[in-house]
Image (tube, helix red, strand yellow):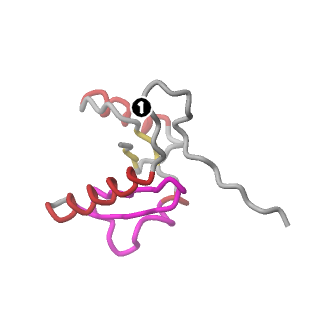
Amino acid sequence: MLSLATDNKENKDNVESVKAYASLAKINYPVGFLTPEVIAYYVDNHDHGVPQMILFGLDGKMVIRRIGWNEKVSKEMRAAIEAQLAKMPTVKPGSKASSRPATQKTKQG
């Protein structure tokens, strides 16, 4: 899980207030700041509702994006996460295999 704050990352007071809130709320996952570029690319101009969940696949591309939370969204997100997990390579416990996804080789032309 990752949380993204929409406060201006350049303002040190905002960074400190987000850190303080995360500590107070006992948030135990990474909290980052949205840049204008990320907002422009992923946020629908017509619906800025929260929470927003975006799942990225192993290839780094967006798999699913949902706004709000209810039972239907919960089921859709769970199914999308399970589908992505099923695509991950199997690594036997104790093996020296990398946990990172394999990179695809491309032809140089």
Q: Which residue is mark 1?
A: 16
In the image, taking residue 92 as reference, residue 21 lies left or right, namely: left
Q: Residue at x 46, y 62 (%)?
A: 62
Where residue 98 sits in the image (x, y, percent)? 56, 34
Query: Which contiguous range is marked in magenta?
Result: 39-68
In the image, taking residue 58 as reference, residue 46 lies left or right, namely: left
Is 16 above or below relative to 70?
above
Q: Residue at x 46, y 24 (%)?
A: 94
In the image, taking residue 79 as reference, residue 101 lies left or right, namely: right
Q: How many marks?
A: 1
Is 26 above or below relative to 31?
above
Q: Residue at x 29, y 33 (%)?
A: 27
Q: Quadrant of residue 109?
A: bottom right
Q: Residue furthest bottom?
A: 46
Closer-to-camera residue (28/73): 73
**For numbered disc 1, what is the local secondary structure?**
helix
The amino acid beneath tag 1 is Glu
Closer-to-camera residue (36/83): 83
Within-10-Å neighbours for mark 1: few <14, some 14–19, many 20+: few
Is 65 above or below relative to 95?
below
Question: Is residue 41 inside the magenta stretch?
Answer: yes
Question: Is residue 34 inside the magenta stretch?
Answer: no
Q: Residue at x 39, y 71 (%)?
A: 44
Closer-to-camera residue (41/62): 62
Where residue 6 sits in the image (x, y, percent)? 41, 51
Where residue 84 sits in the image (x, y, percent)? 40, 55
Q: Residue furthest left?
A: 71
Q: Quadrant of residue 92?
A: top left
